[in-house]
Image (cartoon, rainbow, N blue to C red):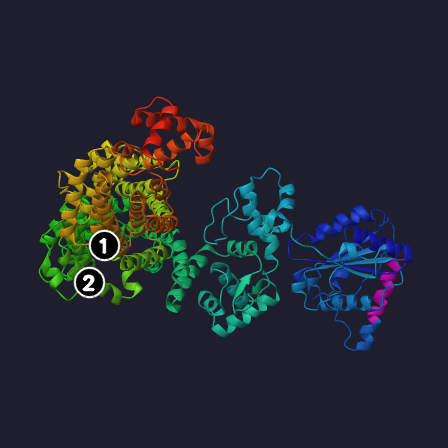
Amino acid sequence: MARIGKAQAAALGHGRQMVCEVVGEPGIGKTRFVREALERCAPTVPWAVGTCAPDERGVPFHVFRHALTKGQPPRRGLRAGRPAPTWAEPAGAVPPASDARRFRTYQAARRLIGLAARDGLVLVLDDLHWADAPSTGLIAHLLRYPVPAPLLLVLVYRPRQMATPMPFGPPESDENADPEPTSRDRIELRPLGLAEVALLHPHVDQAELRARYDLTGGNPGYLAALPAGPAPAAADPLREAPGVRLPDAAVAVLRREWADLPSVELACLRAGAIVDAPFAPDLLAEVAQVPAALAVAAGWRLARLDLIRRVPGTGRFAFRHPVLRMAVAQDTDPAWRVDACARALTALVDLGAPAADRARYAERLLALPNGRWAGRCVDVLSRAAQEIRRETPDLAIRWLRLALRALRPTAGEAQRRRDVSLALAQVTGEAGDLAESRALLQEIVPLFPADPEGRRAQAVALWARVERLLGNYAEAVAISRRELAALPAGTGPAGGYRLATEIGVAGILAGRPVAGLPDALTADPGGPGVDRAGLLAVRGLAAVHDGALDDARGLLDAGARIVDSLPDRDLRDHPDCLTALGLTELYLERQADAVRHLDRGLTLVRASHRDDGLCQLLLARTEVAYHAGRLSTAIGLATEAGIVARRIGSRHLLSFALAFEAEATAWRGGPRDDDRAVALARSAVGIATDPATWCGRTAATALATAALLAGDPATCAELVRSAGGDSRLSRLQTTLRPMWHELLCAAALAAGEVDDAERQARQAMAEAEQVGLPGQRGFAESAYGEVLLARGEVPAAQLHLETAADLFRSGGMALRRSLALASLARAAEAADQPGPAARARRRALELAGWCGTERVALRLARPVGPREAAALTDREWHIARLATTGVTSRLIGRQLNISPRTVEAHLTRIYRKAGVASRSGLVAWVARLDDTDR
């Protein structure tokens, strides 16, 4: 506004013509800006306004007639009785044909304007993008030959819609502008910012204000055109809720831009309002029902009128603004819009458009009361959902639900309803909504007839899988066995493979591996390879559980060969196959193969957003990381698995996640990890309601491990024996029994029961001989070495501990190797062998740092020999040694990052176990047990 004021002052002060150009997008507020500027900056100067109209382009000099001819409405500042120039040409007059006569006409007009401006005048020429050719020529003449009078000529127009551009160059910024304005200036109005829009609408909610700003881009005219109430999230011209319609007055104003279009251009414009932007001319041709060549030409003509604009880098177009598109759609006959949307859907299907593009039109048609397009829309939505279910499952679920609602529950639509419901159950299950998937399957599976193609068998297998993921193992086995027994003759092998696989997996998880899985199916070389590989992997896992390792290796090798030969597109829908394969390889101590297959599965399920498979793969990968000693990795994976398990509503998978996190946390051995590990393990036990299941036993043994490391060997022994069922631990997995006997041995040593510890060590050795796995043999050798070390038989203990360290290295168990090396270092120190002791200590600490555990350093500080020393945990020994140095509980707590009250609780337990009553007694007790100043 100040620039217009400066221009007006310069015109009056120097008695010369000044020109100010005001340009901007439609609706940006050019007319109001000029009016406000004149009222504020030139309230006493006469001013006249001429406005162009699209329907008066044939009238020569119309804008000047409108501004200066007598009989026009009075404008503020024109003095009463002041004579005005007369533009007396008849309305149909045509400008002179020759340049000389045209020049004389322009000069005469210039003199008339000079007369009107002799005492000062502001002449506003608005909407010049609709000006007639003579008016445009006269304006150009005035720019070349300025009026010798105090005239401010204000030119207002939309630059993109000008047939004859009149640029003065970009406007100067305020900081670089001349204090003395030039004879020409250009003011370009820009959209409002969000803060400015908030000032204009102070009572509008922030979220709604943001939605309105995003839709209009800060254009004041379009902001005013929006109806009251929430702004539409997207300008969909087929959804005309009362709160989304533009006011009729706003549509009437915008209609002036297309009211006089020829029929082809108008049809293409209306078609563009129906289709999604950006749109191609060939689609416009199909929707508008005009030849393709005419549609291309119409598109470029509409672009020259700035109704639509070309999208850079493409041959497509889009409306210049969403509000304009809404107005055109609202101004179109509703019946024509419905038919046009159907034509657009047909064209997109024929052109092979992306699924999302096709489905949007199907959604719009189904939202209309006319149901004649329902069948076609259901087919489009179903196919589109199958195409995108891996990339965007939430969108696929929405489309399938919409398709299901569109199908009437009649006999004629029964089969289609079953197919859509089955697809919806599959996608919801993959996305993690197991409850909805189960409800759908319970409803529709009984309606599927038995068929040789095996569609019913595959639906039942899907149902059994959902039941199994929810922890309903008995139901999963029952429905799978019933369907497998009723398979009709000639049924393809795929359904049988999947049913048998579900029987096997559910049996393993229930704690009762099924020994009689149908061998005939696995012997059949036909059928889908991945389904056969899945059954082989599950049978191999069951064989590992039962200790039949030769059978397990054969089944595993056969399944791995199939899986490794398959591309990712064949495996991405079968995450359970890779989970079973990875676990079998882990228990056979083939960690590299397990990592390879599980990481491949994780990559596939993450890419396809399958929460149902993600949780199981994360749990299996957690076990691999834990057995390898990567404690931080194991904790991170277990935490993520717990999050996914909660999201999909699977309590038994959550129990697994908490148990694995508890074990890794306990072995990490931080100052607060003991209590946290016990709490996690107790939560896992509480969730696993049936202790006989795999997750129940896993939770129990995790709590046993956490209890032992927290200083409660009695609870540890009780939990392991309860989970094992008898002294041989026959309920626990055969290939892991040496590990559990080693845990019982450690609990017995911590309780001072060396004889019981030796019995457990000998049992571990016997089980390890039967299993024949290096890692499990390492557990047995380690247990026996610890017993010998407790008895004071140091040379014999060294042999067993050294053997254990080598076996753990062969089994890829870095954490257990570091612990064995720590015990070996203590034994070498007791045997007065400083060289071997230093080497073992250094290597143990290196491995401990790699694993991320503090347990090894704490164990290295323990004395060797007396039974009463074994009663203290590693952490308690650390605190006892700190207490003997004379530091206070507060300083100990600060060093260990625990509270002084926690330190006092530890000291109370230490006093009780040591049989002393004070710190002085503790100092004497530690000195008696340990003559080495550590």
Count of marks, rendered view: 2
Q: Do we see residue 373 in this rendering?
A: no
- Is residue 533 rendered to the left or right of residue 302? left
Nearer to us: label 2 or label 1: 2
In the picture shown, does residue 919 fall above or below 46? above
In the rendered view of the protein, which quadrant contains the C terminus? top left
**Dot 1, how many residues are within 10 Å of its Cα: few (below 14), some (14-19), or many (20+)?**
many
Q: Residues within 10 Å of mark 2 (few under 14, many from 20)?
A: some
Badge 1 amino acid: Ala
Q: Is residue 445 visible?
A: yes
The vertical placement of 772 against 282, above or below, is: above
Q: What is the span of residues highlighted in magenta in the rendered image?
A: 105-118
Residues 241 and 808: in front is 808
Mark 2 vs mark 1: which is more N-terminal?
A: 2
Residue at the disc numbered 2: 557
Q: Looking at the rendering, which quadrant does residue 589 occupy? A: bottom left
In the image, is 497 to the left or to the right of 879? left
The quarter holding residue 15 reads bottom right
Q: Secondary structure at mark 1?
A: helix
Task: In the displayed orientation, state which residue is furthest to the front.
Answer: 832
Predominant SS along the magenta part: helix
Residue underneath mark 1: 580
Circle 2 — which element? helix
Residue 930 screen position, x and y as percent: 34, 35
Question: From the viewer's perspective, is residue 806 above or below residue 280?
Answer: above
- Asked if the magenta segment contains residue 196, the reply would be no
Q: Nearer the viewer, residue 562 or 225?
A: 562
> Is 110 colored magenta in this rendering?
yes
Mark 2: amino acid: Asp
Q: Position of residue 852 (x, y in %)?
A: 38, 47
